[in-house]
Amino acid sequence: MNFWFDPVNFIAHWLTGLLVGWGAANWLASLIIQLIGVVVLISLMMVFDIFLVWVERKVVARFQDRLGPNRVGPFGIFQPFADIIKLIIKEDITPDGADKVVYNLAPILSLMSVLLLWAIIPLAPVIFGVDLNVGALYIIAAGSIGTLSIIMAAWSSNNKYALIGAFRQVAVLVSFEIPMIATMLIPTILAGSMGMNEIVQGQQTVWYVVLAPLAAMIFMIAAIAELGRSPFDLNEAESEIVAGFHIEYTGMKFGLFYAGELLHAFTFGGFWAILFLGGYHFFGLENLGPLVAVVILLAKAMFGYWVIMWIRYTVLRIRIDQMLAFNWKFLTPVAFVLLMLTALMNTLLRGTPSGIYILGMFLTNVLLGWIIVEILRAYSRSERQKTESIASITAAAHH
Amino acid sequence: MIPLSWYLILSAALFSIGLFGVLSRKNAVAILLGIELMLNAVNINLVSFWRYGDVSLMAGQVFAIIVFAVAASEVAVGLALVISVYRRRNTVIADDLDLMKW
Amino acid sequence: MTAMQIFFLIVGLVILGSAVMVVTTGNLIHAALWLIVTLFGVAVLYAILNASFLAVVQVVVYIGAIAILFIFAVMLTRKEMRDRGPQLNDAWWLNAIIALLTFGGLFWMLQSWNGFSKTAADFPSSYDAVGQLGKALISPDAFVLPFEVASVLLLAALVGAVYLAFNPRSGDSRK
């Protein structure tokens, strides 16, 4: 067993030998090693989260034509540490009528729901947490725990504005899960399994973004809504200009919500990369070793995170009723029609050579996109004619 | 390792606790919570019989999925009823909803 | 006592303990949160039973939708932000006796069945339970008819719930 080609098993083997040599039973040794693995993964993700704070602030600064943090260390790289120190030394206020247990549990659950997602991400062909055969649904399940933490935070704050913000946020989260599930089923159909490992291995020859570009776009839109980021961040900005469900949280508890939101965005960038951009595949470069594959996947996840940030800092915010209408009247029917078309074309084109297959799936998506644009154009034309006729009638009535 | 009896006793106990909740809670929403416990007990029973019987017979899991669907629809309609009753009568205590008694 | 048995006992205690808290606690939001703990324990139980698809669907459907619906319903049907007063009926002791009799009756009836204490066969290692479940749900000589009837039931419940909770005085449901 080589370290370079199989690092996790190598370390586990060495540690097992060490622990059994000290006299531990076999099952106890494997339990301890699994616990160590969990702790290592969580620690690495939290350290990476600190780096993400710096990335976020630098990128938003560049989008807004300024420099961003550049005083604390070279290129401002120690800025997140200053942020953490500031959050830790702040006073920890608990509102008077708050429900203490639920109030303190909510930020923990919010961060936990994000860390749970890292268990199924295949960082390399041999480095992953667990090979779950229902990985796509597991993502939705972890999102449900995040939704729950929002309600717990808002209700236990004993604050009506927090409750209103949380109601709206939960309505958006629950609504946008449906197009996300439908578009997550498309890589499932193309790969033949819901497990993340099989989906990545199915993209060895061609990435799924070529086979289903419309699905990638819809998944990105639904993921941004799931994250609660702009243009869907009615939670943070609209609730009477206060901060939504985490109004009453100060200090490090707010820091947990904030860090959890950034890590959640990066995780969904990672899932976009795994489901549609080929995971750790990069023209055969991942065969050099698992650590190279990890770097490739993290680079793609950073690209997905950059796309999410790009959309955040360029597009205006959307109202709650517009958002829900957009979901139920546009995204959900389109996602389901796309799902049915993909399943149909996948079955029809199954035996054909790969060039015709790729071309067929790509053209199906383009055709569906063109039909949708035509429908939207006809709809907006009829809306414009309606407003113009009303305007002309009122203008004629004024004269 | 784990005999089937443990699962059956667990689901029987959960069913009895749910039955107690349905019979003795005043709030209508709390009665629906008890019904949820009973449906979960039934599901545990179905899935453990699937596992301890023939694993290739999918009837146990399919039945459990149908129970999921029925529980979801029953909770949706039940809570909609409770909310509309609350809007009319301004109460959800089951004892006060006695319009048809004389 | 193997590790699996100890783990099952812990999960069983969590399920039953939080179920008791659901039916006895006075604060209804706390009851809904204890229900979430119970549902999560049941999901862990499904995972122990190798029904991985059902475990994840349990979390998505029950915790992610039904429990949130309960919390919303509790919030929409209370006159003030706090609960007070006893939450159990006057005849709760009689109901406790009925519940104990139910449990005793079920236990006595089950333990006279000869398969009561059988242990599980090993789960075949490469058995694609999710794929077999999918095939069973849509093949015409398996369970496609109950599956379609369940979806019609969900549609009827969806339409019915929207109609029942529709409030014609406030105009925001119109959009």
Image (spheres, coloured by chain):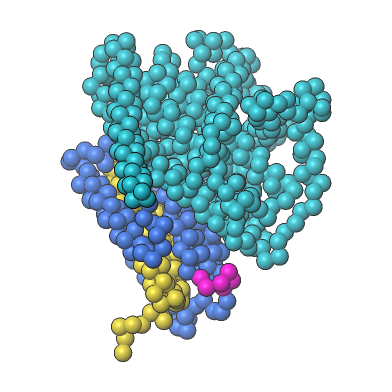
Chain colours: A cyan, B yellow, C blue
* Residue C2 in view, yes or no: no
Query: Which residue is rendered at x = 67% and y = 25% of the image?
Result: A65
Q: Is residue A11 shown left or right of residue B71?
A: right
Total marks in image: 0
Q: Is residue C70 shown left or right of residue A305?
A: left
Front residue (pair A37, A363): A363
The quarter holding residue B36 reads bottom left
Point out the stretch of residues depicted in magenta: C78-83
Quadrant housing the N terminus of chain A: top right
Query: Which residue is rendered at x = 67% and y = 66% of the image?
Result: A97
Front residue (pair A317, A100): A317
* Residue A322 in view, yes or no: yes
- Indicate the position of residue B55 as horizontal and vertical percent values: 33, 41
Does the stretch in magenta take in A233? no
Does the stretch in magenta take in C80? yes
The quarter holding residue A85 reads top right
In the depicted structure, whether residue A220 falls above or below residue C64: above
In the depicted structure, whether residue B25 falls above or below residue C142: below
- Indicate the position of residue A11 as horizontal and vertical percent values: 65, 23
- Indicate the position of residue A199 as horizontal and vertical percent values: 43, 25
In the depicted structure, whether residue C5 falls above or below residue A268: below
Query: Which residue is rendered at x = 47% and y = 31% of the image?
Result: A220
- Indicate the position of residue C91 as horizontal and vertical percent values: 45, 83
Query: Which residue is rendered at x = 41% and y = 63% of the image?
Result: C170
